[in-house]
Each structure stands twice: as structure tokens, then as C-alpha cells.
Image (cartoon, helix red, strand yellow):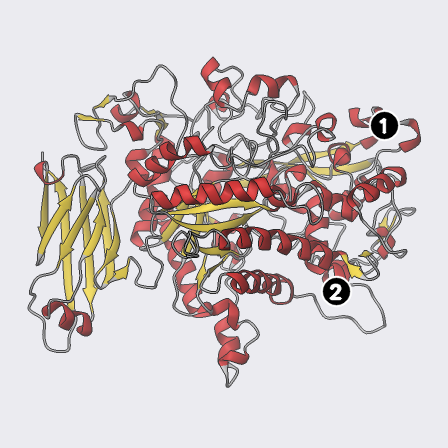
Amino acid sequence: MQDADANGIPNASNAVPVRNEGADGDILRENKAGPGRSPETTRMSASVTGKDMNANDDESISFVGRPFELDEADEHLARLRHWGFRMIRWVVTWEAVEHAGPGIYDQEFLDYTVKALLKAKEYQFKVMIDFHQDVWSRFSGGSGAPLWTFYAAGLDPHHFAATGAAAVHNTLQDNEPLLRMVWLTNYYKLACATMFTLFYAGRILAPNCTFDNGINIQDYLQSHFLGAIRALVDRIHDCRDEDGRNLLEDEVVIGYDSWNEPSNGWIGLERLDVLPEQHDMRQGDMPTPLQSLMLGEGMTVQNVATFQLELVGPVKTGSRTIHPSVHPDAAALAQDQGPIKAWLHPTVRAEIDLKFGFRRDECFPRAGECLWAQHGVWSIEECKVLQQDYFARGALTSAQQSPLIQWVPNHWLPFAKRVIELVRSVHPTAILFLEPPVYVPAPDLVSETKALKNSEQAPNQVLLDNMVYTPHHYDDLVLLTKKYLGWVNIDLLGLSRGRHKSLYGSIIFGKKATESLFGSQIGEIQKECYGRLGKRPVLIGETGLHFDVGLNKSQQAGNIQSSSTRDITNNNNNQKLKTSSIWKAFGFMSSKSTAETAVTAVAAKGLPVQSTQFVKAFDNILQGLDRTLAHYTLWNYTIENTKQFGDGWNGEDLSLYSAPSSSSTATTTATTTTSAADKTLHSLDRGGRAVEQFCRPYPVATVGQPTRILFDRHVGTFRLWTRTDPQQEQQRKGGEGGTSEIYLPQFHFPDGPNSCRVDVSDGSWVWDTERQLLFWTYGSTATQPGKGGEHWLQVSRKF
């Protein structure tokens, strides 16, 4: 018996990440952006305000209860199982484990995580542990690393807002709107770019940043991150029954992600005084690397380009002057600590070093001054670049030009290798879910291995062994603009692969072309994997869509100015968050409405209304995944999603679940044009969004290879085709062929065979309506000796 893609990933074709980002992170209750869970400790969203940072930056925070409180687990796990999900991408951040300081692990959080995973086991979930980050840390607008990592680099997150080092939701002033998806631009700005550059290439690019008699900051950061990973892997390994049998490894936790959406920072840039072409996500202020460095020094910088996201991509709207010295945070500085900079003042750094035990070597760059200037990248006095290609080649040491730094093969892959080697030293059978940088092609490890006589000598063979390729893919234009027109899109994948010469050249026109684009891109990603990494499973590690696509700006998450008492209660005690300036209205820039609301009966009587634009765009994504028989995880499931705040992170609203209002009843009758008519809505469907779209039939496991699936939710028809090889046909005829298993959701096929018809090419079937599973055993087919067999099944609602 084989799974849906016959490549060894059981039940992966329909999976969801339950984000464990903590304190209003990417998913509320993920490990992403947030501290405290107790009433005494303020919960935080994507980052914190300066005045709150001191009280909640390290020892006082906790990620316990992310992704759910243990007493809430049954409801949410039962719902996910009811919707057909069998695998969870379980988000854990570095900060959740090691927030109190280097080498200090949160034992309470580790204990909680094991208990939560044991709850997942009760519902027969398989789990992939995802070490998660976005733009390095919640203090630079995302999630991931602890606050002390900035301190180790000499950076002061309290001054990021004033110096433009990061665009952070919670540090915006009242007159500053949170521009849609602006958090992505932080990858190019001083704070995040510096941290990733140091993490991956500190030995080459920051050789003077050393601790403890010669430990470079690259090794210091990597060793601590790996230590946090090891702490979690060990705790999972140590979970055993009375007879010493492991309760979680393989039975629940089947593998680990290499690291979510890794970034190269500024590594590879060949010019610092222009906006690099690869910095193509542009929104709001977009300083060049040199301008970012100058702002970090507290300098007034003129002609900082400004951009706005439009349907054709980022459009330059002008430029402006940024004055760090007039920012309100500058006025709050003590007189002896000015001017305001992104770098720790010498007095502050000395206190922090004592607190966290940092022992910097004498060669470490001076406090209160840009470390890159001290490495010869630029001149503070002259405000000019001294070596344009510093981040591409390293410091000039001779007249001979150094070779270009190859980030993917020489920096990213070696760290991914260290991750899986560490994991397998404890959990030898763990699957590596190799996640490449966004829009970076799969590394060509097959050619590397073939070039050697003995494949075991290949330096990256450990990455090929028991590995699943796990890239992310979204409909980026819709994701970024929250609009879908149906006749235009952008082929960013093709642009990244060189098929288009410019962003404007990548624009796709026509209804048919835009509808088929996503599926074509998934097929290209799969073929690319097979050619470069060999025939292996491809799991789209993240995909999904904002649920407020197509709505008026005033109706989109983070821009709603008022909410019901229920919404406030559900959103992590938002009343307290408001008084502490943690939650602010996002204030997206206004524009004319493009919404056309599709008021289906499903939405009108029990499930939330989705716009016509959302429905069409989400159908394109899901149908594209079906056409390619792709495994995928949907981002995301946020327990505390609300209409007002969405997922509670940077204006995103992708959660499949949003807590229903208190006025809803436990069971609602829904008459629908897109699903079964006149049926009673299951209690576990309450709170679901677009259930009629994402809750889809699929083959859980098949005898032979599935070759095609088609699902028409409007008429209620599901079709599956499979192919068996000669050996499987022989086993089948001998009575040893096994049974295929198909998930058929009650949402679309209520009452099972009583209201539906099943047709098969051959064989017999049994429908377990309670478990929402159909078991199909092939019968006799007219096959020639030595040939395989073709089989098909069709399930249709009766009208």
C-alpha cells in the first residue's frame, strides 16, 4: 500500500500548521511573536513598544499555551481531524526555548510542548516540527530569535523605529499606517539584514566580532540556536512509557524542518548605494543599504525612496527625508546617551553584557558605532561606501579580487546539514523537511553526488537521505495586494528562474492563464526537485490566502476600528493590550472598494461570508494543488483569530478558523449552492472559514499510484484514477493487494451512501461515514500478463 504520491510521505497531502508562535505571533498562539500568557505579563504581538520592551523582553515572557492551552486541545485537534487533516506543521521558535538568555532553556515550555504533542497523538496526527522565523525576530517585525541575539551583535532594538532599522507594527506612531505586508521589507533593512549576515557569514564578513577568545559571532549564534533545537529534540526523545518505549518519535513527530524561509541578509550584494534588484518586495520606505547604515548611525538621510504595492507590483511614489533625531524615541533618551542610534550605547552595552554573560574579545567592534563601518564597509565621516562589493566578496586583502561568496552551497546548506545531523544524533529515523530560501531553486545535489564514484563520499549526502523537499508557494500578487481581478497576475516564479527579464515582463494576462498559473508553478517546482534532488516527495510547506481578500480596506483585518466585546475577549485581552500600546489599528491607506461579496447560503447561515474575489482565488490555489497531486500544508490555524485583528500579526488574516461569536448556536442549518443542500452544519465546522473549499476529498493511501484527482464542489463529484504496476497487479490477484483509503468529508457528502452514489471501475467498497473514509478494494480487470492496471472511482451526490 502506498500513500498519495507513492513516495513515502504518509498522509501529507492535506496538512495544516498549527502555529506555536506565542503571544499573538504569526498565529496567535504560535511561537512567533510573543511573550507572556499570564494576566501579570502583557502578551505581545509582532513586536513590542519601546516602553514595554524592558518589562517583557526576556525572563518574564512565556510561550506556554502556544498553540493552544491543554484544556482547549481536544476541541481544536478534533476539528482539524474532522476536516481531514492528518499532519500538522508544528511551529516552534528559537525565542520560545531560549528567551531568558544564552544557554538558559525554558523547561516549562519544553514540558508543555511534549504534553501538547501527546494530545496530538490521541488524534493520530503526524507532526513536522518547524523551527520558525520571519525577518529574524519579533523585535524586527516578525518572529524567531530571542532579543538577546540583537544585543550580542551590538544592536539596540529600542531604537529600530527611530532609525528605520525595522518596520515594526507595535512601534509605529499614531500617525503612521501599517502598510500591507511591509514586514517583508525588513529582510533588506539594517536589523534583519545584519543578523542574517552575521549568522551565516560572520567569519568572513565580521571577523572581528568574536567572543570567549576567538569564537566568531557566526559560530556563537549558530551554536546557541542548535542548542535550543537539541533541547527540544532531547525532550521529545525522553518522552517514554513505563517500559521505556518512546511515545512521540516516529509515532507522532516524524521529522524536522531545516529552518523557515532562511534569508541571506546582505550576503551577495555587489553595490550598497542603490536598491538591489533582488530586493523586489518594496513597500513604504526603501532605503538603500548605505542609507540603512547611515540611519543606523542616527544621521538625517535624504531621498529615501518610497513605494506602494499596486496590482502591477511595487510602484515608486516618491522619496522623503528621515530624521532619527526628531523621532519621539529620541526625546526619551537620557542626555548622556544621545544621539539616538541603532547601536547600543557603551554604557547600555556594558550593562547588557554583564546581564547576559557576553564576554567580547578586545577586537570586537566598539559600542555605539556601526560594526560594518568598523570592518571597512563604509565611512561614517564621509558618508560613503569604501568597498561596494564587501558583502559579495569579503574584505579586500590583496590586489587579487576574491571570489564571489556562494551563499546557498557554502553557507545555507552547511547549516541545514548541521541541523539534521544534530537531530538524527538523537532521532536517527527523523525525516528532514528541507526548506529552501524563498524563490531560490532547489540545490543540485544529484549532480554533485553523481560526480563522485562513491555517493557516500558526497558532502551533502546526509541532506538527500530520508529527505522531503518543502518549498513554500503562494499566489503572491493576491497575497500582497489582497485583491484578485481574475484577468491579471504576476509570474514571480518565472521571474526568479530567468524566464522574464523584468517584473513588468512577468505580468500574465487572460482569465485562463491566471486560473492555471498556480498549478503550473507547482508542477514546475516538482519537476525542478526531481531533476536536482532526485525522485522524492515534494511538500508545499506553506500556502494559503488572506480571508479578507476583496473586502474594503475598512473591513480588512487590522483596519477595523471597533469590535464586539466577544472579539476583544478572544483577542488575548485586547483591552489590556490597547492600554499598553501593544495593539494599534493598522490604518491601511484608503482606496476605493474593489469588493464584490459572494453571499452564499453557506456563509449566510452558519459560516463566515467570503468575497467573490477570495472564493475564485482560493479555488485556483486548491485546484492547482489537486491537478499536480501535491502534498501541502495550509497556513494557518489561529485559535484567537478575530475579525478585527485577523491572525494578530502584521495585518495577516489567513487562519482557517476564526472564533465564532457568542450569538452563534452549536448547530446551524445551512442551505448552500456550493455544498450539500439543506444539511445540518456539524458543530466542529463552527468557526471554520471557506470550509466548503479547503475541506476536500483526497486519497489518504492508495494501492498503486494515483494519477489524477478531480473534485467539483459545486455539483458534489469526486473522481480518482490510479495505476498499479505488474507486481501490484499480481499481488492483487493473489488476494494480497490491499485496500485504498479515501477521505470523503461529510460537509460535501452527507449521509454517505444514503445520499451519494459510488461508481468504480472494478472491485468493492465500504464507506465508514462516521470516520469519513471510503475503503476501496480492487476487483478483477482485464490486464495483460506483465502489464499494470488502471482503476477509477467516482463519488457523486444524488439530487
Q: Is residue 765 visible?
A: yes
Work out whether mark 1 precedes mark 2 in sequence or the reverse, and give the earlier one.
Answer: 1
124 is higher (above) or lower (below) than 602: below
Residue sitting nearer the eye, 700 or 444: 700
Residue sitting nearer the eye, 399 or 183: 183
Q: Position of residue 573 (x, y in %)?
A: 55, 20
Instruction: Name the residue that disc number 1 marks.
Output: 333
Residue at point 42%, 41% (across, down): 544
Mark 1 → mark 2, Cα distance in angstroms: 38 Å
Q: Quadrant of residue 478?
A: top left
Q: Secondary structure at mark 2?
A: helix
Instruction: Name the residue that disc number 2 marks.
Output: 393
- Judged left or right of residue 214, residue 487 is left
Residue count near mark 1 (Cα–Cα under 10 Å), binned few <14, some 14–19, many ≥20: few
Q: Secondary structure at mark 1?
A: loop
Q: Position of residue 779 (x, y in %)?
A: 8, 61
The amino acid type, in three-letter code, at marker 2 is Arg
